[in-house]
Image (cartoon, grey):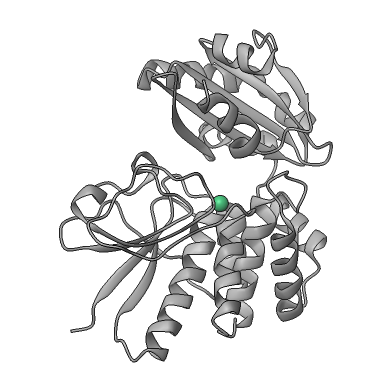
Amino acid sequence: MAEKVVVVGHKNPDNDAISAAIGVAYFMNELAKREGSDTVYEAVRLGPCPPETAWNLDKNGISQPRLIESVGEGDKVVLVDHNELGQAVDGLADAEVVGILDHHRIGDVTTANPIPVFVMPWGSSATVATWLMRLHDIEIPNDIAHVLLSAILTDTIIQKSPTSTPTDDDQIAYLEGITGKERVAFGQDLFRCRGREDELRIKDYVEADSKEFTVAGKTVLIAQHETVDFEAAMAREEEARDHMRHLIAQHDYDFVLLMVTDILEEGTNFLVEGNHAVVDQVFGIDSSSAVWMPGILSRKKQVAAPLLEV
Ligand SMILES: [Mn+2]
């Protein structure tokens, strides 16, 4: 019987978590065929597809990956776009991690055996997946190229994020060649899928792209809401703060930091609820009300990293 492996992105999936998983599953299946192995890799997801992912998959005739809730003993798993237990599928400790492809800091996942690990400091996991396929001379079909290109563009905020690297630029150019898409136009189409600010459920506004971290021994939530309509997004500040206080009461977070990122102006408003002393100390601000942080676009590099050093 063919061995099955699930390829899974993090909880609360963003476009990269799902799209890169699709790319990695494609890559692993092609590699398996080439090596005469009958192992089958299946991309799965841990939450709803973001609107831009749903739109892009639909346009390219790719069905949404299967939704799973947990894994267990005997399951083999490739982790994509994360390598921390806190962000991973439930039950992972009982399953076997057989590969990692990521672009985040090294976390706390451990394995019994040596496994392939590809973690590069580039703008997206899709960048790593594209690079690997090119390295292995695996031809990327048009639909998969659209999926990968979309994830590089959303994760790097169309290359405006400081996490964007020359390698991202190189992979984008390569995928533009396959898809015939132009990066800025395609990127804006993707961001526009996220819809009108005033129609978004406040839960999605705050939580859709949120990650838990441990800062100074306490659990905190850092959320990011990227927008092309900053004014309309900030009109919902009080509603968002109400919801953040609700999350603190529910999960006992030390604080919730919501980054409302203006993609066009290239900066972020910091909204902090809970104990904002650490944020204030690290960034030299007073976040008792919203603070505009010009040039801050990346949660990982510019916000989580300095906070995790505390
Ligand atoms: Mn990513």
Q: Nearer the viewer, residue 93 or 119?
A: 119
For the question of whether residue 193 can be seen, the reply is: no
Q: Position of residue 76 (x, y in %)?
A: 26, 64
Which residue ends up furthest to the front in the rendered image? 114
Which residue ends up furthest to the left in the rendered image? 73
Give the residue displayed 78% in from the left and 37% down from the top: 229
Q: Nearer the viewer, residue 286 or 12?
A: 286
Q: Nearer the viewer, residue 25 or 34?
A: 34
Side of 149 where 74 appears, left or right: left
For the question of whether residue 135 can be seen, the reply is: yes
Q: Nearer the viewer, residue 18 or 77?
A: 77
Side of 76 where 279 appears, left or right: right
Give the residue displayed 62% in from the left and 11% down from the top: 281
Q: Is residue 259 above or below residue 56?
A: above
Give the residue displayed 59% in from the left and 23% down from the top: 240
Q: Is residue 154 above or below residue 128?
A: above
Give the residue displayed 61% in from the left and 36% down from the top: 299
